[in-house]
Amino acid sequence: MKGRKGLLRFLPLSAMLLFLAGCGEDRLTALDPYGPQAQWIFDNMILSLYVMALVIIVVFTLFFIAVVKFRRKPGDDEIPKQVEGSKTLELTWTIIPIILLVILAVPTIAGTYYLAEEAPEAAGSSGEEEGEEAEEAADAAAEGEDAVVIDVTGHQYWWQFDYPEGFTAGNEVYIPVGEKVWFNVTGNDVIHSFWVPALGGKIDTIPGVENSLWLQADEPGVYKGKCAELCGPSHALMDFKVVALERDEYDAWVDSMSQEEEAPEENSVAAEGRQVFEDQGCIGCHAVEGQGSAQGPTLTNFADRDYIAGVIDFNNENLEEWIRDPQSFKQGNNMQPYPDMSDEDMEAIIEYLNTLSVEDEE
Amino acid sequence: MATATATKDKSVLWDWLTTVDHKKLAVLYLIAGTLFFVKAGMMALFMRIQLMSAENDFLTGQTFNELITMHGTIMLFLAATPLIFAFMNFVIPLQIGARDVAFPFVNALGFWIFFFGGLLLSVSWFFGGGPDAGWTAYVPLSSGEYADLGLDFYVLGLQVSGIGTLVSAINFIVTIINMRAPGMTMMRMPLFCWTGLVVSILIVFAFTPLAAGLALLMLDRIFGGQFFIPDMGGNAVLWQHIFWIFGHPEVYILVLPAFGIISEVIPAFSRKRLFGYTAMVFATLVIAFLGFMVWVHHMFTVGLGPITNSVFAIATMGIAVPTGIKIFNWLFTMWGGKITFNTAMLCASSFVPTFVLGGVTGVMLAMVPVDYLYHDTYFVVAHFHYIIIGGIVLGLLAGTYYWYPKMFGHKLNEKLGILMFWLFYIGFHMTFFIQHILGLIGMPRRVYTYLEGQGMETMNLVSSIGSFVMGAAILVLVINVVYSAFNSERITVNDPWDARTLEWSTPTPIPEYNFAQTPQVRSLDPWFYEKVHGDGTMKPAEPMTDIHMPNGSILPFVIGLGLFTWGFGMVMMNMENTIVPPFLVIGTGVILTFGSMLIRSIKEDHGYHIPLEQVKKIEKEVS
């Protein structure tokens, strides 16, 4: 995988990222579920497959017996018995399917409500209960206060993730492992659909509508997400990643994302790059450390990413090409091209972008 | 054929442009539908070439989106619908013992309006590219802000062709209710007529919301409306509701006639009456009714809430019951029969297991939470192609091979036919079965490419190869049509298949008036009944007299042309620097359309009579 090589060559080797890289491929397939929601979906798919296999076996058996046994022999002009029908048989193949459908309908409805669970109220409500339930309630309340609720906005063609702590992430969303994380999703321009196959189902991000979805990852790792609703020429390239971290690592990540920007060292190439970043108006769309707007993906932790724009292998050559001609990678995206930027400016800005990391650099 | 018309001296072209004969219109539908089918099929092959390998750059994302949109739109509106209409037009009047449809003029009108609507949609390629928002045209992607002229052609092209479909459907309803021969009670009607009646009713109820939705989208796009623009207080989800209230019944509009064809072909080649005829009729009605109750299952991930989703999930599962009844009745029609396997029967019988595979994934899709996984992935693509190809196309192929001798006076070559069937069947499963798995491993639908290293390369390659095999099968079919036209033996008997229903009692080729004397129907499968219990001919229900026939007319063609011009003028309102002002073009279209209607209303046209002597002469020639 090319992306992995670029990553290893390039990124500062923080211990955590090494660990993540060690996990191998990003998790994508829904056939290998990594959370309770994905597991529920997978189990019920298997249940329905068993039921359907039964139907298929019955039909195929009858079919093959019929086509083998009841062929007309050459010269056989006898007219077979003209059967009108059979009430018993009609009733049989009405009632048995109904029973099979009930077997599927019950978990369907139960699951629909299970997955529709709303995010807990952030304000600590309970705490009054006494006795056996008190501890449990306190846990629940604590969980409620701690519950991570992330606002997701779909853009052509990138994902904006707003954290309750007030910072924004683009194209990569970090979540804590082992707990339900709620995503409140909406669309900015057209309809997209937020989907992380290995963690659970999908939900549409519709302009003017707020939907919600919870996901839970049971293991740390990187889970690949995709846009599942046609949203324009680069719909296929609207990938994102869910990075699941242990709770303490997650908290550390949140802290460093929330911190004030550390200005690059005076007179360094990176400082020059920062200047170019402002002069060329990049900051007009790309926020860094909370400064600037969110018309384009936030770049606060840009250098921590494996991919540029969600799909391009992260290396300096690709980064330069992307800045000069983004349309050649992602047709129809809204980034302004900078074909005429001087080589010095380009070098500086790439250097600067490479410093945008929230991981510990040692 | 048609040796006795009052206007014998017209040229061949003029004859076809003005014809109101249901049999000739059927041929026109067949040709138009086939051309559109081949065109949209080529688009599918282009898409499969693009998806053959990871990160392929054969097509850009924009072109790919135009191809998916046109592939879907053409296949459903301009290929499947007219092909179904071709058979309904040809077969239904013959099966119910009528001389033509109730309104022959309206029949021609329906065809020409449909045809010009399709043309309007197709010319979008010459004006900056086809529509690119998917055949479902979800707003806001299809709104003025995000989509170009292509969508205007989509909106107006479908609006026009929809009018054609709608008037044809009304015509079929009236025909089937009013024009049945004496003794052809509703419960003696062949199942194909039943499905024809039911889908015509479905069209009336489903195409009207589509027309309304398209009108709203047109107002948004051309006249600055805000129905679907969230920033202006519009509602983006509203379009999806309107579209799927039409879109789901549309599936049944296409698949029920295919069920009808299967229900004709299987009994004919099993030499046995349809098992559980009454149950089949009621199953058809129940499917049609439930078809309107399930549209939200296309929108489970829209976030309508668990109550809504649960209700529609149960309704959707409910459809499996009548469909299952149909499957088992077909199986038991073959059971105990004497089956002949020719191409028509191969297509019809293999339809049964194939359709079951599409049906079971349909039930799986109805499980809301699991649908959160399937929705908008290749799993869904695989599912609906199993329904549409495994159901509708196999049905249409069966119908083509079955009715071809009656339509064209010769059979299609059987060897080529069987070759086509196996190529098609193997290619089909190769293309689509594997797509179920592609969806589950995380491939969304409508993606123009996929990245390397996600495990999708091999399966996509297999799928693409399968699609080429299917393409080869269609090529064999085309070769077969040409080859058989020159080399096949002419059919001189009425009934080359030893079949059961009334259309096979007519001489081949069929005289313009179908039946010299309206037949008296004494049973279900009336032709079979007369062969077994009677003397092998239909008993006449009336004396032989002069036969009243409708005159041909160019007006349907002109009205179609007028609507095309009108629609094109509307699209021009969104064009920059047009050579002529749009209002001029719109005005011309309006004048052509309403002028023709005026002429039709004022000018009296009582048709003409074929004198008795001539009828007798023709009957002697054909028998």
Image (tube, helix red, strand yellow):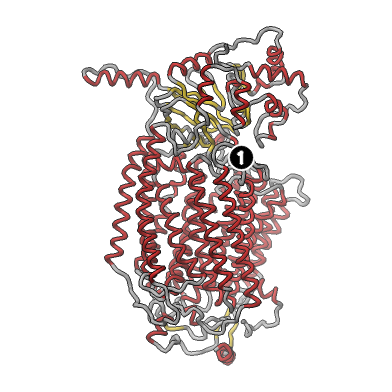
Above/below status of B87 relative to B388: below
Left or right of B533? Residue A5 is right
Percent position of residue A85, x then y: 32, 70
Question: In the rendering, at what x and y percent does residue B615 appear?
Answer: 57, 89
Number of labels in the image equals 1
* Horizontal side of residue B426 vs A313, given as left or right: left
Question: Relative to the observer, which residue lies in front, B105 or B273?
Answer: B273
Above or below A155: residue B133: below
Amino acid at pointer 1: Gly
Residue plotted at (35% across, 58% down):
A58
State the quadrant of the N terminus of chain A.
Answer: top right
Res. B595 image quadrant: bottom right
Q: Is residue B540 visible?
A: no
Label 1: element kind: loop
- Residue at point 59% right, 37% down? B451
Q: Residue A166: x and y, percent? A: 51, 18
Quarter containing the C terminus of chain A: top right
Q: Nearer the viewer, residue B504 or B487?
A: B487
Query: Within the image, what quadrant is residue B79 found in?
Result: bottom right
Q: Residue furthest top?
A: A266
Which corner quadrant of the image does residue A32 belong to? top left
Q: Residue at x 64, y 51 (%)?
A: B46
Q: How many residues crowd around disc 1 within 10 Å: few (fewer than 14), some, or many (20 or more)?
A: many
Q: Which residue is mark 1?
A: A232
**In the rendered image, the vertical position of residue B587 relative to residue B491, given as above or below:** above
Residue A115 image position (x, y, % from top left): 38, 35
Note whether B267 is above or below B578 in the view shown: below
Note whether residue A186 is visible: yes
Which chain letter goes with mark 1?
A
The extreme left residue here reads A131
